[in-house]
Amino acid sequence: MNGLGIVAAESSADSFKFFASRPVRIGEYVVVETPEGGALGLVERSLITSYSIATANTYIEAAEAGKASSSNPRDKGYKASARVLGLVEKLKVGVAYMPSVPPVPGTVVSEASSELLSSIYSRTERNFVPLGSLLRNQEVTVSVDINKVASRHLAILATTGSGKSNLLALIAKRVSKVRGTMVIFDYHGEYSELKIGTTSHVQPKINPRELEAEELAELLDISSSASRQRSLLASVLTNEVRRAGDFWEALNGALNGIMNDVEKSVEDVRNAQRLIEIIERARRRKGRIIDPDIGDPLDQVRPNYINIIDMAELTETQASIIISYYLSGLLEDRKQAQRQRMSGGEGRVRFSSPVIVAIEEAHAFLPADNHEKHDATSAASKVAREGRKFGLSLIIVSQRPSKVNQDILSQMGSLAVMRLTQPKDQSYILESSELMSEDLASYLPSMNVGEAMLLGQWVDLPSIVKVEKVEEKLTGADIDAVKQWSESQSRSGIAREDTSEFIKGI
Ligand SMILES: Nc1ncnc2c1ncn2[C@@H]1O[C@H](COP(=O)(O)OP(=O)(O)O)[C@@H](O)[C@H]1O
Ligand SMILES: [Mg+2]
């Protein structure tokens, strides 16, 4: 171990500041002696100060001070603060045990060795899977406890383009390797090309017989302002129609009945006519999704597979209905499975082992302002609260954490936070989760693509990691517009000379 610094005048058992002999990088690990033995610290903040430049008031003074400073080693101060993660000897055996006495000011601070960090982060038990390496020490592989993801939920939060979907694809790849069951709601068709072994691509289906009238109205694309059409639909969606052998025929029959009823107002007749057209159009466009003759849509979700639910063709509200429908169904099934496991009992269970459900764009489907349209929020809150007992867990993915429902976010036992630039999002995560510290939050805007802070139960100890890139995930990268324009231009036969003449003329 190398001498790196000296503990500053005031320290506490959970954090300390130290003067360093060189600039220290956030995410580095250090070891410091305490009266109870060596303790491991994670650098969460780093400062460089120059005493001569601090007194400069003008550009010339600053330039002179800068020159003087470069030849005077006493002028520059490197200072860092570290969070204490636990006693080294305990960490080596997998226990995070905090010292009760702070390191004494003046004690030497050393760099943590790769061997020590590997013994802590590169766990190889069956339930641990590798996700990448420590950002400041790439020799050290970081593994996470996938059992904790399957029971205590996970949130992946970062600005667009920082690597959230890549991380989710990596987790899916690891889960696939242990033949786990995952359901990914793919709103952007991003995972349509994912090739990681046990993937199953699912066309979502929903049975209109089981929907509330308002939900069916959404699926049929009846405008939300067309309240008369909506109430007319509610009035014809009787139990008799729901149970009819041919659902669509029965629904049409009921509407035709209104059209031919001389007692009805002109407006009702017109709306019934309009509804018939709307239903016809929706069946043409969405017949594959709204299907009264499917048994249970959950039958399409395969246990021990990574199920990608393709929602690219759906509007946000329709996707929200699908999410709510599948989540409620999965929770019921897992409850039933658990009951049978405890007390025997009868009945068909689809998923006899835990299921992980991933929801991308969580700010859209599980929004903070609990709009009544968003049934997915209530279904997901239920899973967030109860899922742990039944082996049903959530992975919430969002680029706008401050817009995600806080009740749900606060239930997430683990976090992967990547680059985040909005102060509002940073403070919201601080509020919602005790896992994040202010110092770490202030570093979030400086992170690069593919770098993630892993916090919470899946890692035990916080770490800043370079996440492995998943080559099997082909889509989701930024569109290369220039390349595509150039290809379409040569396809359409525009002569290259023309363009070059044009460019010359600029
Ligand atoms: N760990 C990583 N290493 C290298 N490149 C990455 C990594 N994660 C993501 N990328 C690249 O960054 C881009 C955006 O990644 P993506 O996962 O789609 O971000 P997000 O889902 O946050 O918008 C992609 O082109 C992807 O290839
Ligand atoms: Mg994404």
Image: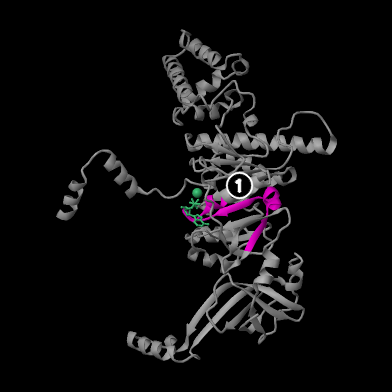
Q: Is residue 72 visible?
A: yes
User: Where does the image place residue 499, in percent across and percent down from the top left?
Assistant: 20, 48
Give me the residue at 48% from left, 64% from top.
445
- Up the image or down, 83 lies above or below 283; here it is below
Determine the residue positioned at 71% across, 33% down.
350
Residue 230 sits above or below residue 185 on the image:
above
Total marks shown come to 1
Question: What colouring does the structure picture have?
Answer: one colour
Q: Position of residue 99 (x, y in %)?
A: 74, 74
Pick the quarter of the image with the N terminus: bottom right
Would you name the residue on which mark 1 appears? Answer: 172
Residue 436 versus residue 186 in the image, above or below: below
Instruction: State the residue in front, 82 or 38.
Output: 38
The magenta segment is 141-168
The question of residue 316 being in magenta is answered with: no
Quadrant of residue 176 within the rendered picture: top right
Q: Is residue 165 magenta?
A: yes
Give the x, y percent position of residue 150.
Answer: 69, 48
Q: Nearer the viewer, residue 237 or 435?
A: 435
Local secondary structure at mark 1: helix
**Mark 1 within 8 Å of ligand 1, using the beta carbon:** no
Q: Is residue 30 left or right of residue 51?
A: right
Instruction: Bin the neighbour count of mark 1 within 10 Å (Cα to Cα): few under 14, some 14-19, many 20 and up.
Output: many
> In the image, what residue type sits under mark 1?
Ala
Q: Is residue 434 visible?
A: no
Residue 106 in picture, x, y percent from top left: 66, 87
